[in-house]
Amino acid sequence: MTSELQSFLCEQEIVHETSIPHVHQQNGRVEQLNQTLLEKAQSMRLEACLPNSWWEFAFATATHVYNCTSIKRLK
């Protein structure tokens, strides 16, 4: 992390916490979201009978749909 970023975080009173590399257990919610998006994208692609080359578009669409969906914890 650059000193410029460190000073910015300090000015904004943001605590920067890092996780241990290659230890996915520390990122449980993120790992679950990744799995959800992968499954949604795969389902969309297969339902539309699209080839593997359309994977990027299916993933982008799944991400867009997820971002537009209301989340219970945010009310």
Image (cartoon, rainbow, N blue to C red):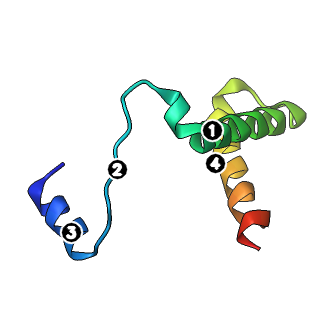
Residue 39, position in %: x, y?
76, 34
Q: Earlier in the sequence, mark 4 or mark 1?
A: 1
Q: Does dot 3 land on a helix, a strand or a loop? A: helix
- Whole-percent x, y for residue 27 in the image: 53, 39
Q: Amino acid at mark 3?
A: Cys
10 Å neighbourhood of mark 1: few (<14), some, or many (≥20)?
A: few
The mark that comes first in sequence, 1 or 2, is 2
Amino acid carrying label 1: it is Asn
CB under 8 Å between discs 4 and 1: no
Residue depicted at x 79% and y 65% = 72
Residue in front for this viewpoint, 2 or 58: 2
Q: Disc 1 on helix, strand or loop? A: helix
Q: Residues within 10 Å of mark 4 (few under 14, many from 20)?
A: few
Element under label 4? helix
Label 4 is placed on what type of residue? Ala
Dot 2 corresponds to which residue? 17
32 relative to 40 in the view: left or right: left
Residue carrying label 1:
34
Q: Nearer the viewer, residue 29 or 60?
A: 29
Residue at position x 66%, y 43% in the image: 33
Q: CA distance from mark 3 to mark 2?
A: 13 Å
As measured in the structure, the alpha-carbon distance from the residue carrying label 3 to the one carrying label 1 is 30 Å
Q: Nearer the viewer, mark 1 or mark 2?
A: 2
Q: Name the quarter where the C terminus is drawn.
A: bottom right
Disc 4 versus disc 1: distance between alpha carbons? Answer: 12 Å
Q: Which circle marks residue 10 in the picture?
A: 3
